[in-house]
């Protein structure tokens, strides 16, 4: 059997894996990213790119390249609570070069990172390439198997998502924090407006998030975990009526839902590894911590993990050093922000979603803290900073080996 080798093997071409691939290749580390799908075109994936992430692209000199990709700008976050429209966060005063949330399809985000990474000769991306097993040398991970081909690597990064195969094979311990909700995702058309009107609607027994994607709404209908089959059995007419009653301003667009095939189930998970590594292997992104969709933080935490991993490991790997004794530093750096964000998400689940969706507590007006934000708008800067910039924000400190090709990056190989 033919055997391959590389310095760094990354399983998974999502935000964590692709960003890690870019940064390690930039440092001169021979990097191979394996993505099991043929392309990045998968609908209803997280696509909120926060100012903290765009600031990293600014540090890389690539913010203009990122923002040249299709996106919509949300400079504020608003909601409708008990029938009253309120503003929750104002990003326009953040200490960042991009003072808004970019609503960018994840495939466009990943295509941008891939194009930037291809400018480095040490980077390789292989599509239709699924990692199915780990290679071992005693108790150390020595690579992985892809399409029955062993690929040896000095380090394997597991960035293969919230149902990571590799973290299970490496027996990394997982803590389930519990998520009492699931979500139906669907699209409804809308007229394009000069301002972004993303919002969330909270009413008695109902919670609906609406992302303004220009000419359509990306809708998230929240319900109690395990109730998907019951909602389907009640019929599509009942579901349409419920959506229309929750957000009357959607008008006739609700009638576009003609089949349950248009409604995708997102099973919400909230968990984290208590150990992110073992010799030869490091887990990052969703493989290390599955996040709730609350706050749209998933992409951004995954990218921050990748930056931290490169900051600690890329330089030593480029110098030929063994990094097994450094892996714990990545976990130590990223565990605190993970715990803080997940604690905030659990609080939102227990104090808002549990009351609204699970217990049907009557919602007649916004809570006191939200009313205070309307009276004193400066308070809206607090959630804007927490959401937009996050906790323990990373900066790009991994080395640039200066091997970037001149001119445009080469086109990806065609199958």
Image (cartoon, grey):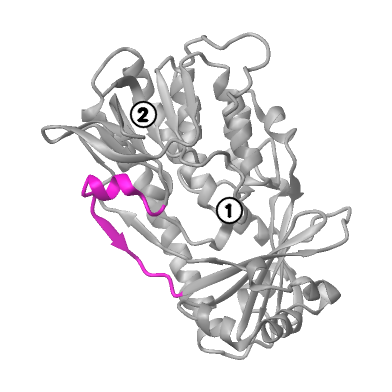
**Residue drawn where x is 79% and y is 71% of the image:** 256
Image: magenta residue range: 162-180
- Decide: is 189 above or below 50: below
- Decide: is 321 above or below 188: above
Q: Quadrant of residue 363?
A: bottom right
Q: Name the image quarter holding the C terminus.
A: top right
**Residue drawn where x is 45% and y is 43% of the image:** 392
**Relative to residue 167, is residue 304 drawn left or right?**
right
The residue that mark 2 highlights is: 9
x and y percentages locating residue 355 in the rendered image: 52, 84
The residue that mark 1 highlights is: 45
Q: Quadrant of residue 375?
A: bottom right
Residue 397 showing in the rendered view = no
Dot 2 falls on a residue whose secondary structure is strand
- Would you say residue 176 sits in the magenta stretch? yes
Q: Quadrant of residue 184?
A: bottom right
């Amino acid at each position: 059997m033919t055997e391959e080798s590389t310095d760094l093997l990354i399983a998974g071409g999502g935000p964590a894996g692709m960003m890690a691939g870019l940064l390690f290749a930039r440092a001169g580390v021979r990097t191979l990213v394996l993505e099991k799908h043929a392309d990045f075109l998968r609908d209803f994936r997280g696509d909120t790119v926060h100012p903290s992430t765009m600031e990293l692209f600014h540090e890389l000199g690539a913010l203009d390249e990122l923002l040249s990709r299709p996106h919509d700008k949300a400079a504020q976050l608003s909601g409708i609570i008990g029938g009253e429209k309120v503003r929750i966060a104002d990003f326009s005063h953040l200490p960042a070069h991009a003072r808004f949330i970019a609503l960018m399809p994840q495939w466009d985000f990943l295509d941008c990172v891939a194009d930037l990474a291809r400018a480095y000769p040490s980077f390789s991306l292989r599509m239709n390439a699924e990692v199915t097993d780990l290679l071992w040398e005693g108790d150390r991970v020595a690579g992985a198997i892809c399409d029955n081909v062993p690929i040896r690597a000095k380090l394997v990064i597991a960035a293969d998502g919230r149902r990571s195969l590799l973290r299970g094979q490496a027996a990394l311990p997982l803590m389930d924090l519990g998520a009492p909700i699931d979500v139906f995702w669907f699209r409804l058309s809308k007229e394009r407006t000069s301002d972004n009107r993303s919002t969330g609607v909270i009413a008695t027994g109902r919670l609906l998030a609406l992302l303004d994607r220009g000419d359509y709404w990306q809708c998230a209908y929240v319900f109690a975990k395990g109730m998907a089959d019951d909602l389907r059995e009640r019929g599509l007419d009942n579901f349409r009526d419920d959506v229309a009653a929750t957000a009357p301003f959607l008008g006739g667009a609700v009638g576009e839902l003609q089949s349950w095939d248009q409604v995708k189930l997102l099973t919400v998970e909230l968990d984290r590894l208590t150990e992110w590594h073992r010799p030869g292997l490091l887990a990052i992104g969703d493989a290390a911590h599955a996040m709730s969709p609350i706050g749209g933080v998933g992409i951004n935490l995954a990218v921050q993990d990748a930056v931290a991993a490169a900051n600690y490991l890329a330089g030593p790997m480029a110098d030929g050093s063994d990094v097994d004794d450094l892996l714990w530093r990545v976990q130590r750096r990223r565990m605190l922000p993970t715990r803080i964000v997940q604690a905030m998400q659990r609080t939102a689940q227990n104090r808002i979603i549990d009351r609204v969706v699970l217990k049907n507590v009557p919602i007649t007006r916004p809570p006191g803290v939200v009313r205070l934000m309307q009276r004193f708008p400066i308070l809206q800067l607090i959630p804007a900073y927490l959401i937009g910039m996050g906790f323990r924000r990373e900066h790009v400190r991994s080395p640039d080996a200066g091997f970037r090709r001149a001119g445009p990056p080469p086109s990806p190989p065609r199958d």
